[in-house]
Amino acid sequence: MNKETKLRIHNITAKAALKFGSEAWVLKKREEQRLEAAQMKFLRHLLGITKLDKEKNQCIREKTGEENIVMEIKQYQEKWLQHIQRMDTNRIPQQALQYKPKGRRHIG
């Protein structure tokens, strides 16, 4: 199987699985690192590069033409937020976005 076919399979399956449900995520630094590591593991395998070859992640992304998965998720979240803001106010996602709880939380 050639590189282009493997890359298309990655974009259809693995990347979709990594991004599933990401519109509601709050990414912490550790989660960003894990997502990037999973993406780089696949791309290294796709190109036949091991960590011992000491190729930089940016070089691997340039060879495959892929963007950082964390940046893609952040762009997806921005697009989702804009989509929700365009919705009518009676829609559930719009109501969830505008929700302000009443009262105070309990200690603990």
Image (cartoon, rainbow, N blue to C red):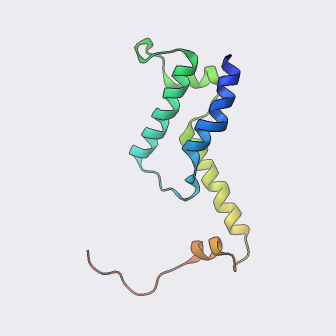
Looking at the rendered image, the quarter that the N terminus falls into is top right
Direction from residue 86 to residue 101 in the image, left or right:
left
Direction from residue 35 to residue 65 in the image, left or right:
right
Furthest-left residue in view?
108
* Rendered view: 50 above or below 12: above
Res. 59 visible in picture: no
Direction from residue 11 to residue 53 in the image, left or right:
left
**Who's the residue at 68% across and 61% down the image?**
82
* Rendered view: 17 above or below 94: above
Q: Residue 40 location, x and y as percent?
A: 50, 28
**How many numbered marks does the figure carry?**
0
Q: Residue 94 location, x and y as percent?
A: 64, 73
Q: Nearer the viewer, residue 92 or 64?
A: 92
Res. 87 visible in picture: yes
**Who's the residue at 46% across and 43% down the image?**
32
**Who's the residue at 26% across and 74% down the image?**
108
**Who's the residue at 53% across and 27% down the image?**
42
Q: Nearer the viewer, residue 52 or 18?
A: 18
Q: Residue 59 location, x and y as percent?
A: 55, 20
